[in-house]
Amino acid sequence: IPVEPFDLVLFGATGDLARRKILPGLFHRFAVGQMPGSARIIGSARSEMSAEAFRADVARAIREVAPDTPEREETLAAFLERLDYVAIDVGGEAGWSDLTRCLRNDVVRAFYLSVAPSLFAGIARQLDAHGLATRDSRIVVEKPFGRNLDTARDLNAGLRASFAEHQIYRIDHYLGKETVQNLMALRFANSLFEPLWNATHIDHVQITVAESLGIEGREAYYDRAGAMRDMVQNHLMQLLCLTAMEPPAKFTPNSVRDEKVKVIEALDPVPPEDIARGQYAAKAGGDGYLDHVGNPDSRTESFVAMKVHVANWRWAGTPFYLRTGKRLRARESEIAVFFRDPPHTIFPGTGPLKGNVLAIRLQPDEGIRLQTTIKDPGPGGFRLAGVSLDMSFADALGEEAQAPDAYERLLMDVIRGDQTLFMRGDEVEAAWAWIDPIIARFDDSRDRPAPYDQGSSGPEEALMLMHRDHRRWRQIG
Ligand code: NAD
């Protein structure tokens, strides 16, 4: 279904994210007919250049990522006609009136800030001062949203000085993933799972976001952030919230986000013994975390595993184990829900029965899989075997249903005015309020993160965190 006509102003239009994700995402939506022919995208960045030069640059960026189909060039030519460019150094006064002249009054207006967060408040102020921020316009901001509670509050205050909360779209691209939304469908559109979705039936939950890459190209940023800030505070906590939240009364942005905030507020503080930190070690020729950041004393974690308690009626006694890290065995993200073992077996010689595991996989192959136990087929006596009920989207729904990139989905939601998959200001602050004391303890501690082998599943300490509880991590890769 095509969205309404819009003017989208993309600040940071010459940057890495814009070229790799946002502009190709818009192109793809245009190609499938979701972007109306009258929609316009106005790129803006510091560099002086003509609209023609900008279009040529965007064409290059899109050719790098979009498949070379027979229709691509024709569609691309039509897409480029929708583009314009206005040079603005957002710290200065020049260029804003050019932008004003570009914008129409009778269409949806969105400002996408694909720039450093230190520029957010200034851009919001300028948009307001130049009368560009209408009552209905939207402002979209990228991560990181602060580096602690204080900076997140400042960012919120800076944006809210010019925009109301219902106009602010804080991106966490994990929420745009098809499977993440499917988790909500699975829980709230089926009667099978929800009655079992609690501590009585679920033993524990594992949330893993493993990356095989290191911190290439982002060394300076990453060494100031670490896995807690870069991954846990946003992506892992969002996955935790969607898994643990109560059913919202309605599928409206605020109903859903109210329930997510309640989960964060229910989180117990995490004692030191429930966290393991790691840093990927050097190989024979160097190439370790410390080599990458060029600082042999860095105590920043490139891996973290932790045991988290959602202290409420539904989850009392069912821990959530989170782990994320760089240079691990494989690039893999999933939520695995471990149901309790059957209490009794009637089958002689089979040993204790294993609980079902529901694995909600976000990457690489998005899909949902339920591990069950069946009779091993054949006449060889009554033996049991594990089998997966596989709900892989590509198989189930065909090629047509190939999941759009998370950014595409989120961009269209901005135009539709649907904030469900965007973080609300109080949600981000609640997440920082819970994370801050953990990071403060890291900073105060003289302990170094434990080194781990590249291509492994993290340090020994992370394995111990599970073994101690007589549980095991699911294998990565
Ligand atoms: P980048 O450095 O590649 O690009 C920054 C853009 O901002 C450029 O277009 C530049 O011209 C523009 N810019 C900088 N200063 C400006 C000024 N004073 N006035 C006007 N324009 C100015 O950065 P990026 O990697 O594209 O990241 C953009 C934002 O997205 C950042 O907040 C980043 O944290 C976030 N982000 C990036 C990625 C990624 O994969 N690159 C992923 C997640 C989040």
Image (spheres, rainbow, N blue to C red):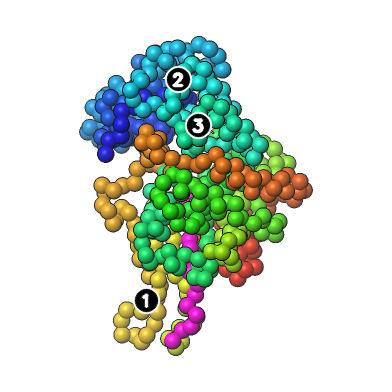
> In the rendering, at what x and y percent does residue 410 appear?
40, 39
Q: Secondary structure at mark 3?
A: loop
Please, what is the three-letter code of the amino acid marked with disc 1? Ile
Q: Earlier in the sequence, mark 2 or mark 3?
A: 2
The answer to whether 358 appears left or right of 313 in the picture is: left
Please, what is the three-letter code of the amino acid marked with disc 2? Leu
Residue 187 in the image: above or below residue 284? below
> In the rendering, at what x and y percent does residue 28 appear?
32, 35
> Which circle, 2 or 3, is nearer the viewer?
3
Q: Earlier in the sequence, mark 1 or mark 3?
A: 3
Q: Quadrant of residue 465?
A: bottom right
What whole-number distance in Å separates the C-alpha atoms at marks 2 and 3?
14 Å
> Which circle, 1 or 2, is nearer the viewer?
2
Look at the image and tell me whether residue 56 can be seen: no
Q: Secondary structure at mark 1?
A: strand
What whole-number distance in Å separates the C-alpha atoms at marks 1 and 3?
54 Å
Q: Earlier in the sequence, mark 1 or mark 2?
A: 2
What whole-number distance in Å separates the C-alpha atoms at marks 1 and 2?
62 Å
Which region is colored magenta? 330-346
Crowd around label 3: few <14 · some 14–19 · many ≥20 (10 Å): some
Disc sitting over residue 164 in the figure? 3
Is residue 106 in the magenta section? no
The answer to whether 210 appears left or right of 179 in the picture is: right
Residue at 57 percent of width and 33 percent of height: 156
Residue 127 in the image: above or below residue 173? above
Residue at 36 percent of width and 79 percent of height: 375
- Residue behind mark 1: 374
